[in-house]
Image: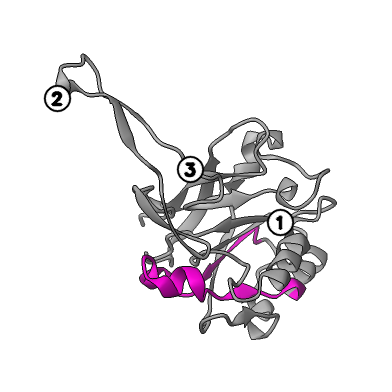
Amino acid sequence: MYRYLSHILNNEIPVYGGSASLDICPVKSMSKGDPVNVFKFSMENHWGTHVDCPAHFFKEGKKVVDYLPDAWHFKHPQIIDINLKPSELLVCDDWVRGIRPDSDILLFHSNWGELRGHALYSNDNPGIHPEVGNYLRSKHPCIRAIGIDWISISPFKNKELGIEAHQSFLKPDNPILVIEDMDLSCEFSKLKEVWVIPLRVDGLDGAPCTVIGVFDES
């Protein structure tokens, strides 16, 4: 069984600190006599469900197109259930003891996705303390990515700490990719694999992505 773990890109979407429009508009339309339908849209590369690569904060860091296909395939995903208040920071506490040694991606399920579309989601989002990135990179080298169901690991009310948080995960010597604004609203007990499919555009430090979860049907 396959399920999307990423949000649909609508014309109006929540973004860090507010909302934005993709300006989706028709270029050609069959309803107006054209032989085909063609649309155009514009968006920033960190809108919607997207992945941050090291180049987002490091000049020498990898960009989206620098990764081989198998870098986007995670065979040992692990869900971390957490509760976070507005602007609260995730720190290294009891949850770190439950990390499996083979985990290659951690998906932080907080239920903040239920607030998506509300001002609270974009303006009062929780964040992740830099100690978490440093801890995971040093203690769990198998982890290659994290995913969150809120807008950013950077709390909008504490942007300076948010920069440090991103840097702690994305350090080029042993980076952990960051996937933000995911849809983690489904049941995860039988999650087996995760595929992250970013839009591959030359030069981008990160990109919108489709994320697919593979679930055991037995």
Give the extent of the magenta segment.
Answer: 103-131
Q: Position of residue 61 (x, y in %)?
A: 79, 45
Which residue does the image show at 74% across and 46% down from the upper left? 55
Q: Position of residue 70 (x, y in %)?
A: 64, 39
- Mark 2 and mark 1 residues within 8 Å of each other at the beta carbon: no
Q: Position of residue 56 (x, y in %)?
A: 70, 49
Which residue does the image show at 77% across and 64% down from the upper left? 168
Residue at disc 3, secondary structure: loop
Disc number placed over residue 43 in the picture, else none: 3
Relative side of 6 to 140, left or right: left
Disc number placed over residue 127 in the picture, else none: none
Q: Is residue 217 above or below residue 62?
A: below
**In the image, what residue type sits under mark 2?**
Ser
**Mark positioned earlier in the residue sequence (1 or 3):** 3
Q: Which residue is mark 1?
A: 176
Based on the picture, tell me whether residue 111 belongs to the magenta stretch. yes
| Quadrant of image for the C terminus | bottom left
Q: Which residue is mark 2?
A: 31
The crowd level at tag 1 (other Cα within 10 Å; few <14, some 14-19, many 20+) is many
Q: Is residue 213 visible?
A: yes
Q: Nearer the viewer, mark 1 or mark 3?
A: 3
**In the image, what residue type sits under mark 3?**
Met
